[in-house]
Image: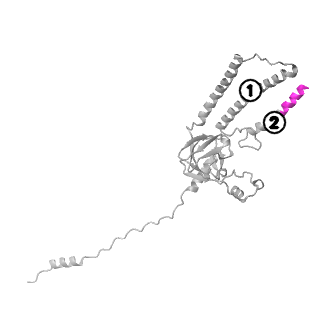
Amino acid sequence: MKAGRFKQWGAGIAAMALPVLASAQAADPKPWQLNMGRGVTMQSGNAYDAHMFALWVCVVIGVLVFGAMAYAMFKFRHSKGAVPDKDFTHSTKLEVIWTVVPVVLLVLMAFPATSKLIKMYDTRNAEMTVKITGYQWMWKYDYLGENVGFTSRLDRKSDEIRQSGVDARTANHPHYLLDVDNVLVLPTDTKIRFVITADDVIHAWWVPALGWKQDAIPGIVNEAWTEIDKPGIYRGQCAELCGKDHGFMPIVVKAVPMAEYQQWLAAQKAKNAPAPGPAATPAAPAQPEATTPNTDATAAAAEKQAPVAG
């Protein structure tokens, strides 16, 4: 009887855990997602692994603590004739155990967390650099060294819906407030360095699938980097209250293979290239000026040559 109940409990817990674990693999948040996502970068994978390690440590501690409490409450309850030990004051052995065990756990978690945190800010050996500037209320992206740059703001359809006053759930826009007019296109399997700042107030550039958030502060340039593993569309938002339209400056990153990225970059360069002006007509060669004989000099020379009459 008891074994059957334990099997039922186990099946129920597994059924509850399956959607949680499945949603954890997704890059973007899903409805009713309870766990954090793994993301599509090394940083997001490191954060997910650290989170899961700490989670299972807490689960084990919780099972031991609440299990001991439940055992004590049922085993030594008053109805069974249990009598409290009024002479017990303390146990040095127990005090050492519950002091040493947490310290050991913290040290075990600190070493991997510190090493991964150092790697998260190591922007050396990046293959390209993108400058991100926050404005009220949009983002500006500049591909340094490529002469390509553009602004990215809330898409027109979302803006029309929010200003119309209609219920957004009936507006047939699945990415309401999460679409932009110009997406940030990045290549996959490439280490990309970001330099992030702001022009007016403090913003924060945050895409959950990339695994990090970086503040954009006027007068300060912060650094970050990413290397996206899988092509796809990854969405984020400004994560710092920056004014009345703070909720209307989304971020959309489109990750594509390197060959497709090179084609997109060439098209952007062609679009930004200055239009050729009208061809200049060659100037006609200057004609030499006609020389007119000096009549006065000719007359004087003739007078010298003429014989003088006797």
Q: Is residue 118 above or below residue 198?
A: above
Q: Where, quadrant-wise, is the C terminus in this rendering?
A: bottom left
Between disc 1 and disc 2, whose residue precedes?
Answer: 2
Q: Is residue 25 above or below residue 10?
A: below
| Helix, strand or loop for disc 2 | helix
Give 306 or 295, whichever is nearer the viewer. 295
Q: Toward the viewer: 5 or 97?
A: 97
Locate the N terminus by quadrant: top right
Mark drawn on residue 266: none
Residue under the image location 66 percent in, 28 percent down: 109
Residue occupied by mark 1: 61
Q: Amino acid at mark 1?
A: Ile
- Residue 165, quarter of the rendered image: bottom right
Task: Please name the residue that numbered disc 2 is placed on.
Answer: 16
Q: Amino acid at mark 2?
A: Met
Secondary structure under badge 1? helix
The reply to whether dot 1 and dot 2 touch (C-beta < 8 Å) is no
**Crowd rating for badge 2 (residues with CA inside 10 Å; few <14, some 14–19, many 20+):** few
Q: Which residues are magenta?
A: 1-12
Colouring convention used in this rendered image of the protein: one colour
Q: Is 119 on the left-hand or right-hand side of 173?
A: left
Give percent across and percent down for residue 296. Answer: 21, 78
Which of these two is toward me, 136 or 129? 136
* Residue 298, image x, y percentages: 21, 77
For the question of whether residue 163 can be seen, the reply is yes
Residue 116 horizontal/vertical position (percent): 62, 33
Give the x, y percent position of residue 83. Answer: 83, 18
**Residue at 33 percent of width and 72 percent of height:** 289
Residue, far bottom = 310
Q: For residue 138: magenta?
A: no
Q: Is residue 191 visible?
A: no
Question: Residue 16 occupies which quadrant of the picture?
Answer: top right
